[in-house]
Image (cartoon, helix red, strand yellow):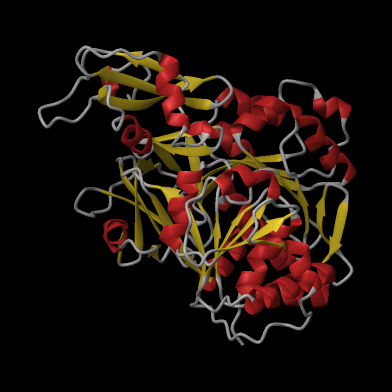
């Protein structure tokens, strides 16, 4: 028997049939009910003509249906393509067309994005809730007409399971591919490293289109844990859920951590069951870590580092975060990390070089992009482009992200993507994007713009122009007009010469 994601859910539905699998906005779904609904959707997709290897895209909030889509596709050998609902129509269009998705399942509250999509031949629409799109089928109606039996599609560990799109330094999104085997190993790695047991109640705050949340969900289903979903973040609601649902684990980003520390929530809510909290997405202040540990001493706080392409990278927990300031920890159980020079030779302890990952969870490459795949995968090693070093105790220190990456509130923003948009404006002659420090978001986008001769623009004009092509969180928060950009002899912009630029 092949061990696949669909098998994991079926097994948990047998072992934990009446246990609560998902909690969301008053809804409580047992593992048997979840498996039944997944089967209904899986058979409905088959009836719609979805075959093994077809791509099923989803653009959904954190709801039980998001999990149902992931596992229904898994059971019939289809490939899930999660889409960030913060993107604009043109960005969504690229992902749908590049992936060749056959179905888009979306929340009706995202109708405006769907209305802005170009016509894609053969793409079928399924809406969660009402929809004004004439050719959109309704999710619940599909399930009501479907059948409950387990789909009889042969699915294997080596089959492709997921395409997770991540913006590339060229400015074009790349779809990192993962098999069922990648997924299973990632789940096991998380379970063992974070010491999950079957009694965990895991709060999912970050969006399920992010690798971090997705990985936590598949780990929970593997163990038969209860998953508590937050559709949208709210500090009070989060603390109420931790108290009322007796949450034991969660994963957040530094922006949320900062907001939790703004009020004495630890005195207002019972958090005695909360034992573990991972904070991922961007580097965060040492003082913030220290304060959180002081105010929630019963919670093991952890900091994680990695990349979408590798599922899991490193983890540092509790006292080690204070003892090793600046470190991102040690590799997960099944993760091998090396630091190498430009020729691939391993660096000595304390010497900086490129961070590379190896393990059974590493991506198979980028969907329909062999050139990009060849650049980052060599003999199974993923070349991150990030720079770091190991200390004498085997702790990894991350020095610099890929040069063009800005992380704002947990979202990855690649400067080339924004630069490629702005350079198309007829009034702009040259542009460079950098990240500047921000108290709440960690980093925000700033644009340095060189206007064409005799042209004029305002800051608002530049920002609003980006809004037509980019998600809101990618737009510049500030614009500085300059006569020229500092460049080296090769014509490369020297970002370290700019205020807020890389050091």
- Residue at screen point 32% across, 24% down: 503
Quarter-of-image position of residue 196? bottom right
Tell me: 1 left or right of 197.
left
Q: Position of residue 39 (x, y in %)?
A: 73, 75
Q: Is residue 75 above or below residue 69?
A: below
- Residue at screen point 69% across, 31% down: 293
Quadrant of image for the N terminus: bottom right
The reply to whether residue 310 is visible in this rendering is: no
Q: Position of residue 355 (x, y in %)?
A: 35, 48
Give the residue at the far left of this rendering.
489
Q: Is residue 129 above or below residue 45?
A: above
Which residue is at the front of the view, 181 or 153? 153
The reply to whether residue 305 is visible in this rendering is: yes
Which residue is at the front of the view, 445 or 307? 445
Q: Position of residue 319 (x, y in %)?
A: 62, 36
Tell me: 153 left or right of 395.
right
Give the residue at the far front of this rendering.
134
């Amino acid at each position: 028997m092949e061990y696949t994601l669909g098998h994991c859910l079926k097994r948990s539905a047998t072992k934990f049939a009446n246990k609560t699998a998902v909690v969301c906005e008053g809804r409580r779904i047992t593992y048997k009910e979840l498996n039944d609904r997944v089967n209904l959707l899986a058979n409905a997709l088959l009836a719609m003509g979805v075959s093994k290897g077809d791509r099923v895209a989803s653009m959904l909030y954190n709801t039980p249906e998001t999990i149902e889509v992931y596992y229904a596709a898994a059971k019939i050998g289809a490939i899930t393509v999660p889409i960030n609902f913060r993107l604009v129509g043109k960005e969504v269009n690229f992902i749908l067309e590049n992936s060749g998705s056959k179905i888009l399942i979306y929340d009706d509250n995202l109708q405006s994005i769907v209305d802005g999509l170009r016509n894609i031949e053969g793409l079928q629409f399924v809406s969660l809730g009402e929809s004004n799109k004439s050719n959109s089928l309704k999710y619940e109606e599909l399930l009501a007409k479907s059948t409950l039996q387990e789909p009889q599609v042969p699915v294997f560990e080596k089959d492709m399971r997921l395409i997770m799109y991540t913006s590339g330094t060229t400015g074009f999104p790349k779809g990192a591919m993962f098999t069922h085997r990648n997924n299973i190993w990632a789940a096991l790695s998380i379970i063992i490293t974070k010491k999950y047991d079957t009694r965990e109640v895991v709060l999912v705050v970050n969006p399920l289109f992010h690798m971090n949340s997705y990985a936590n969900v598949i780990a929970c289903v593997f163990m038969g844990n209860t998953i508590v979903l937050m559709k949208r973040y709210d500090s009070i609601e989060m603390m109420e859920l931790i108290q009322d649902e007796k949450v034991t684990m969660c994963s957040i980003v530094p922006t949320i951590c900062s907001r939790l520390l703004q009020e004495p929530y630890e005195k207002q809510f019972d958090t005695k069951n909360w034992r573990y909290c991972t904070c991922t997405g961007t580097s965060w202040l040492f003082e913030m870590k220290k304060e959180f540990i002081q105010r929630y001493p019963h919670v093991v706080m952890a900091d994680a580092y990695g990349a979408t392409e590798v599922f899991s990278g490193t983890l540092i927990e509790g006292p080690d975060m204070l003892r090793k300031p600046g470190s991102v920890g040690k590799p997960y159980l099944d993760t091998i990390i090396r630091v190498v020079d430009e020729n691939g030779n391993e660096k000595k302890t304390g010497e900086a070089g490129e961070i590379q990952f190896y393990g059974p969870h590493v991506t198979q490459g980028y969907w329909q992009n062999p050139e990009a795949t060849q650049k980052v995968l060599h003999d199974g090693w993923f070349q991150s482009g990030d720079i770091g070093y190991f200390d004498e105790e085997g702790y990894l220190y991350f020095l610099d992200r890929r040069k063009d990456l800005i992380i704002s509130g947990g979202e990855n923003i690649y400067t080339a993507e924004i630069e490629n948009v702005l350079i198309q404006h007829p009034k702009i002659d040259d542009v460079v994007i950098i990240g500047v420090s921000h108290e709440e978001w960690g980093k925000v986008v700033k644009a340095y713009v060189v206007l064409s001769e005799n042209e004029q623009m305002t800051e608002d004009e530049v920002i609003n122009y980006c809004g037509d092509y980019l998600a809101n969180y990618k737009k510049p928060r500030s614009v500085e007009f300059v006569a020229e950009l500092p460049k080296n002899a090769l014509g490369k912009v020297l970002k370290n010469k700019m205020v807020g630029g890389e050091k």
